[in-house]
Image: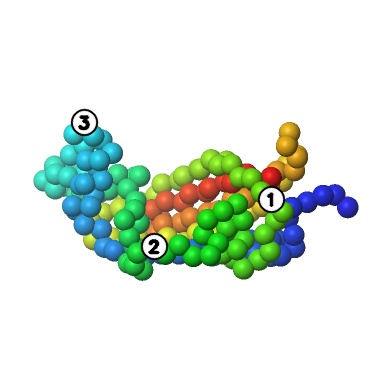
Amino acid sequence: MTETHISQEMRDAIGSIERQSVSFPLAESDIRKWAMAVYYPEPPPRLFWDAEYAATTRYGGIVAPEDFNPFAWMSADGPAKVRQGDIGVTSREIRLGITPPPVTNQLNGGVEVDFGVRMRPGDTISSVTRLHSYTEREGRLGLMLFTTSETVWTTQNDEVVKTSRDIHIRY
Protein backbone atom coordinates (compact mmCIF):
# COMPACT_ATOMS: atom_id res chain seq x y z
CA MET A 1 0.00 0.00 0.00
CA THR A 2 1.27 3.46 -0.91
CA GLU A 3 2.00 5.88 1.93
CA THR A 4 -0.65 8.57 2.39
CA HIS A 5 -1.60 11.27 4.89
CA ILE A 6 -5.23 11.19 3.75
CA SER A 7 -7.39 8.87 5.83
CA GLN A 8 -10.89 7.73 4.89
CA GLU A 9 -12.18 9.92 7.73
CA MET A 10 -10.52 12.94 6.07
CA ARG A 11 -11.98 12.02 2.66
CA ASP A 12 -15.43 11.72 4.22
CA ALA A 13 -15.06 15.22 5.73
CA ILE A 14 -14.61 16.92 2.32
CA GLY A 15 -17.47 19.38 1.90
CA SER A 16 -17.92 19.84 5.66
CA ILE A 17 -18.35 23.34 7.05
CA GLU A 18 -15.26 24.53 8.92
CA ARG A 19 -16.73 27.85 10.03
CA GLN A 20 -19.45 30.34 9.16
CA SER A 21 -20.30 33.88 10.12
CA VAL A 22 -22.61 36.80 9.35
CA SER A 23 -21.53 40.45 9.24
CA PHE A 24 -23.23 43.46 10.69
CA PRO A 25 -24.97 45.53 7.97
CA LEU A 26 -22.28 47.47 6.08
CA ALA A 27 -22.17 51.19 6.75
CA GLU A 28 -20.88 53.87 4.37
CA SER A 29 -18.45 54.95 7.09
CA ASP A 30 -16.98 51.39 7.26
CA ILE A 31 -16.39 51.43 3.51
CA ARG A 32 -14.97 54.96 3.57
CA LYS A 33 -12.55 54.19 6.45
CA TRP A 34 -11.37 50.96 4.79
CA ALA A 35 -10.73 52.80 1.51
CA MET A 36 -8.88 55.60 3.31
CA ALA A 37 -6.64 53.05 5.05
CA VAL A 38 -5.79 50.94 2.00
CA TYR A 39 -5.16 53.86 -0.36
CA TYR A 40 -3.19 55.96 2.15
CA PRO A 41 -1.28 58.23 1.57
CA GLU A 42 -3.19 58.78 -1.68
CA PRO A 43 -6.86 59.73 -1.56
CA PRO A 44 -9.23 56.80 -2.17
CA PRO A 45 -11.28 56.66 -5.38
CA ARG A 46 -14.47 58.70 -5.11
CA LEU A 47 -16.53 55.57 -5.81
CA PHE A 48 -15.88 54.52 -2.20
CA TRP A 49 -16.82 57.73 -0.39
CA ASP A 50 -18.62 60.31 -2.60
CA ALA A 51 -22.31 59.29 -2.87
CA GLU A 52 -23.09 61.96 -5.49
CA TYR A 53 -20.24 60.88 -7.74
CA ALA A 54 -20.86 57.15 -7.14
CA ALA A 55 -24.49 57.60 -8.25
CA THR A 56 -23.21 58.52 -11.74
CA THR A 57 -21.16 55.31 -12.12
CA ARG A 58 -22.26 51.93 -13.44
CA TYR A 59 -22.78 50.87 -9.81
CA GLY A 60 -25.35 53.62 -9.15
CA GLY A 61 -23.99 54.29 -5.67
CA ILE A 62 -21.17 53.72 -3.22
CA VAL A 63 -19.65 50.23 -3.27
CA ALA A 64 -16.90 48.70 -1.18
CA PRO A 65 -13.43 47.95 -2.55
CA GLU A 66 -13.23 44.28 -3.58
CA ASP A 67 -10.74 43.62 -0.76
CA PHE A 68 -13.10 45.06 1.88
CA ASN A 69 -13.50 42.68 4.82
CA PRO A 70 -16.76 43.10 6.75
CA PHE A 71 -15.43 40.62 9.34
CA ALA A 72 -12.18 42.52 10.05
CA TRP A 73 -13.30 43.92 13.39
CA MET A 74 -16.15 41.73 14.58
CA SER A 75 -19.02 39.73 13.13
CA ALA A 76 -22.65 39.88 14.17
CA ASP A 77 -21.87 36.68 16.12
CA GLY A 78 -19.84 38.79 18.58
CA PRO A 79 -16.13 39.04 19.30
CA ALA A 80 -13.97 36.24 17.94
CA LYS A 81 -13.26 33.55 20.49
CA VAL A 82 -10.17 31.41 20.17
CA ARG A 83 -11.28 27.82 20.66
CA GLN A 84 -9.44 24.54 20.95
CA GLY A 85 -8.13 23.74 17.49
CA ASP A 86 -8.32 27.26 16.03
CA ILE A 87 -4.55 27.55 15.74
CA GLY A 88 -1.95 25.06 14.58
CA VAL A 89 -0.88 22.67 11.86
CA THR A 90 -3.85 20.33 12.43
CA SER A 91 -6.43 22.99 13.41
CA ARG A 92 -8.71 22.26 10.45
CA GLU A 93 -9.21 18.61 11.38
CA ILE A 94 -9.59 19.41 15.08
CA ARG A 95 -12.36 21.93 14.25
CA LEU A 96 -14.06 19.28 12.11
CA GLY A 97 -13.79 16.67 14.87
CA ILE A 98 -11.70 14.22 12.86
CA THR A 99 -8.32 12.62 13.49
CA PRO A 100 -5.56 14.94 12.20
CA PRO A 101 -2.97 13.74 9.70
CA PRO A 102 0.55 12.96 10.98
CA VAL A 103 2.08 16.30 9.97
CA THR A 104 4.13 18.84 11.94
CA ASN A 105 4.91 21.68 9.53
CA GLN A 106 2.78 24.01 7.42
CA LEU A 107 3.33 26.50 4.62
CA ASN A 108 0.94 28.92 2.91
CA GLY A 109 0.30 27.52 -0.55
CA GLY A 110 -1.49 30.61 -1.83
CA VAL A 111 -4.97 32.01 -2.28
CA GLU A 112 -7.15 32.20 -5.39
CA VAL A 113 -10.08 34.63 -5.42
CA ASP A 114 -12.99 35.05 -7.84
CA PHE A 115 -15.06 38.20 -7.35
CA GLY A 116 -18.80 38.52 -7.94
CA VAL A 117 -21.12 41.41 -7.04
CA ARG A 118 -19.77 44.42 -5.16
CA MET A 119 -20.67 44.93 -1.50
CA ARG A 120 -22.84 47.99 -0.82
CA PRO A 121 -23.92 49.97 2.23
CA GLY A 122 -26.72 48.09 3.97
CA ASP A 123 -25.59 44.66 2.78
CA THR A 124 -25.25 41.85 5.30
CA ILE A 125 -22.58 39.37 4.25
CA SER A 126 -22.58 35.67 5.11
CA SER A 127 -19.37 33.67 5.01
CA VAL A 128 -19.20 29.88 4.83
CA THR A 129 -15.88 28.03 4.75
CA ARG A 130 -15.86 24.38 3.68
CA LEU A 131 -13.13 21.80 3.38
CA HIS A 132 -12.73 21.61 -0.40
CA SER A 133 -10.06 18.98 -1.05
CA TYR A 134 -7.00 17.02 0.00
CA THR A 135 -4.27 16.09 -2.47
CA GLU A 136 -0.71 14.85 -2.06
CA ARG A 137 2.60 15.10 -3.83
CA GLU A 138 6.07 13.86 -3.07
CA GLY A 139 8.52 16.69 -2.33
CA ARG A 140 12.10 17.19 -1.23
CA LEU A 141 11.03 16.92 2.41
CA GLY A 142 8.80 13.90 1.88
CA LEU A 143 5.11 13.47 1.25
CA MET A 144 3.31 16.84 1.14
CA LEU A 145 -0.39 17.22 1.94
CA PHE A 146 -2.18 20.01 0.06
CA THR A 147 -5.36 21.05 1.86
CA THR A 148 -7.76 23.48 0.17
CA SER A 149 -10.56 25.33 1.93
CA GLU A 150 -13.16 27.28 0.00
CA THR A 151 -14.89 30.33 1.46
CA VAL A 152 -17.98 31.81 -0.20
CA TRP A 153 -19.30 35.24 0.79
CA THR A 154 -22.87 36.04 -0.18
CA THR A 155 -25.19 39.00 0.31
CA GLN A 156 -28.53 38.85 2.06
CA ASN A 157 -29.98 38.23 -1.44
CA ASP A 158 -27.77 35.14 -1.96
CA GLU A 159 -25.60 36.94 -4.53
CA VAL A 160 -21.99 35.73 -4.50
CA VAL A 161 -19.57 38.48 -3.46
CA LYS A 162 -16.46 36.36 -3.68
CA THR A 163 -15.17 32.82 -3.60
CA SER A 164 -11.69 32.23 -2.24
CA ARG A 165 -9.67 29.04 -2.11
CA ASP A 166 -6.89 28.87 0.49
CA ILE A 167 -4.23 26.23 0.03
CA HIS A 168 -2.07 24.97 2.88
CA ILE A 169 0.89 22.69 2.35
CA ARG A 170 1.66 20.39 5.26
CA TYR A 171 4.35 17.76 5.74
Number of other residues with Cα within 10 Å of mark 1, as a class: few under 14, some 14 to 19, many 20 or more: some
Residue 72 pos. (x, y %):
34, 53
Q: Tag on residue 42?
A: 3
CA gap, disc 1 and disc 2: 27 Å
SS for tag 2? loop
Q: Amino acid at mark 2?
A: Ala
User: Mark 1–mark 3 contact, CB under 8 Å?
Assistant: no
CA gap, disc 1 and disc 3: 44 Å
- Asked if residue 140 is positioned above or below residue 31 in the image, the reply reads above
Q: Is residue 128 left or right of residue 73?
A: right
**Dividing the image into 4 quarters, which one contains the C terminus?**
top right
Number of other residues with Cα within 10 Å of mark 2, as a class: few under 14, some 14 to 19, many 20 or more: few
Residue drawn at point x = 75 percent, y = 40 percent: 142
User: Mark 3–mark 2 contact, CB under 8 Å?
Assistant: no
Residue beneath label 2, please?
A: 80
Residue drawn at point x = 21 percent, y = 57 percent: 27
Say which of marks 3 and 2 sits in front: 2
Q: Amino acid at mark 3?
A: Glu
SS for tag 1? loop
SS for tag 3? loop
First reached walking from the N terminus: tag 1 or tag 3 = 3
Residue beneath label 1, please?
A: 103
Residue 137 pos. (x, y %):
73, 41
